[in-house]
C-alpha cells in the first residue's frame, strides 16, 4: 500500500512538473521550410543509416534482454520531455532546452538513442509544431546522431583516461549538448549562407547560440551526473546490462 | 551536509531565475525564434507553417498538457518497472 502511494506520488509529481514547465518556446529544432529541399534530403540521407542501424540493434538486443524495452521506454520518455522543455536563461534573456541525448547514449548506447530521438522528434513535429517533417532528418542528425555519439564517445574516452565516472558523465552531458548546437549551426550555415562566407555565417550562428547554450550545456552535465549517480546507487547492474560498462 | 548543499544550490538557482525574470525586459523567446528563424528570414528562407497548425486559441495548451501528461506517465510507468520500491540495491 505504501509502495503504491509512493508510485502515485512519483507519477503525479513528474506529471505536474511537466505540465507546469511546458510553454510554447523551443530551441534547436529547425522549423518546417527553413532548409531548402536538397539540404533537407541530404540530412535525411545522413541520419537514415544511423536510424536503420539503431532499429537493427533494437531488434537483436531486444531478443536477449528483457529489461531493454522498459529502459528504452524510460529513456525515450525522458528524451521527449527534456527536448521540449524550455528553460529560461537569465543571462541571455531567451529560452532553450537541454537535449537529453548524452544521458540516453550512456545508458542505452548511441544507436538506440538515435531511435528514441527519432520517435521524440516525430511526435514533436506532428503534434506540437516543434521542428518540422521536412527538417526531421536534419534535427535527427544534430540531436540524435551528433548529440548521442559525442556524449557516448566523451563518456567512454574520459572514463578510461581519468577513471572517474562523474567527470566522464559531466563532460558527456556538456559536450553532447554543445555538439548538437554546433551541428545545427553547420546545417544552417551550409544551407543559408548564400553569397556570404560559409565560415563567417557558421560563426555568427554558433556565437548566437553561446549565451543560451553555454549555461544550459553545463546544466545538462549536472543532469547527466545526477542520473548516472542514481542508477549507480540503485541498480548498478543495469549499466552493465545495457551498455556493457565496467565501473571504475 | 549533502542535503544542505543541495538545498543551497536549488535555492540559489531558483533565486537567480526569479530575479532574472523580474528584472529582465526580454521576451524570453526560444532560440529557434531568436536565432534560427531570425537568420533564416535574413537569408530569405523564412519558415513555413507546420503541417498541423496548433496555433489556434488554447489548443497549444491542451496539446502540451496531453504531451506532458503522457510523457510523465510513461516515464513513471517504466521507472517503476526498472526501479521497484522494494528493491534494496
Image (cartoon, coloured by chain):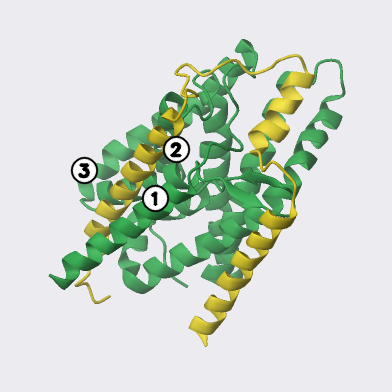
Chain colours: A green, B yellow
Q: Residues within 10 Å of mark 2 (few under 14, many from 20)?
A: many
The lab-note entry on whether marks 1 and 2 share a chain reads yes
Mark 3 belongs to which subunit? A
Q: Which residue is mark 1?
A: A108
> Which numbered disc flags the more N-terminal residue, 3 or 1?
3
Closer to the camera: disc 3 or disc 2? 2
Q: Is residue A22 above or below residue A52?
A: below
Residue neighbourhood size for the residue with mark 1, other residues' Cα within 10 Å, grouped as few (<14), some (14–19), many (≥20): many
Reading the image, the residue beneath label 3 is A63
Front residue of B45 and A200: B45
The answer to whether one can see residue A189 in this image is no
The spot of residue A220 in percent (x, y) is 57, 56
Q: Closer to the observer: label 3 or label 1?
A: 1
Task: Give the image location of residue A201, x and y in percent.
Answer: 82, 29
B85 on left or right of A45: left
Q: Which residue is mark 2?
A: A117
Amino acid at each position: 500500500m505504501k509502495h503504491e502511494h509512493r508510485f502515485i506520488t512519483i507519477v503525479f509529481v513528474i506529471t505536474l512538473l511537466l505540465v507546469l514547465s511546458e510553454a510554447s518556446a523551443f530551441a534547436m529544432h529547425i522549423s518546417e521550410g527553413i532548409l531548402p529541399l536538397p539540404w533537407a534530403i541530404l540530412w535525411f540521407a545522413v541520419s537514415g543509416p544511423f536510424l536503420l542501424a539503431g532499429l537493427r540493434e533494437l531488434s537483436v538486443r531486444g531478443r536477449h534482454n528483457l529489461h531493454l524495452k522498459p529502459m528504452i521506454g524510460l529513456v525515450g520518455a525522458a528524451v521527449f520531455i527534456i527536448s521540449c522543455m524550455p528553460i529560461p536563461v537569465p543571462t541571455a534573456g531567451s529560452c532553450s532546452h537541454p537535449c537529453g541525448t548524452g544521458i540516453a547514449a550512456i545508458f542505452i548506447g548511441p544507436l538506440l538513442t538515435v531511435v528514441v530521438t527519432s520517435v521524440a522528434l516525430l511526435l514533436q513535429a506532428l503534434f506540437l509544431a516543434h521542428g518540422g517533417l521536412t527538417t526531421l532528418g536534419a534535427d535527427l542528425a544534430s540531436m540524435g546522431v551528433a548529440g548521442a555519439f559525442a556524449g557516448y564517445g566523451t563518456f567512454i574516452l574520459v572514463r578510461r583516461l581519468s577513471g572517474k565516472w562523474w567527470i566522464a558523465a559531466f563532460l558527456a552531458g556538456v559536450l553532447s549538448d554543445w555538439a548538437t548546437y554546433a551541428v545545427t549551426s553547420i546545417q544552417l550555415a551550409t544551407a543559408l549562407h548564400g553569397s556570404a562566407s560559409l565560415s563567417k555565417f557558421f560563426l555568427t550562428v554558433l556565437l548566437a547560440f553561446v549565451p543560451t547554450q553555454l549555461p544550459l550545456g553545463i546544466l545538462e552535465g549536472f543532469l547527466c551526473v545526477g542520473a548516472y549517480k542514481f542508477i549507480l546507487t540503485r541498480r548498478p547492474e543495469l549499466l552493465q546490462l545495457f551498455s556493457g560498462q565496467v565501473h571504475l | 551536509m549533502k542535503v544542505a548543499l543541495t538545498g543551497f544550490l536549488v535555492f540559489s538557482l531558483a533565486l537567480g531565475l526569479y530575479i532574472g525574470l523580474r528584472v529582465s525586459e526580454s521576451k524570453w523567446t526560444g532560440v529557434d525564434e531568436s536565432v534560427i528563424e531570425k537568420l533564416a528570414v535574413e537569408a530569405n528562407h523564412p519558415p513555413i507553417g507546420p503541417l498541423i497548425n496548433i496555433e489556434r486559441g488554447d489548443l497549444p495548451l491542451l496539446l502540451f498538457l496531453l504531451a506532458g501528461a503522457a510523457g510523465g506517465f510513461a516515464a513513471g510507468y517504466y521507472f517503476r518497472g526498472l526501479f521497484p520500491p522494494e528493491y534494496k540495491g
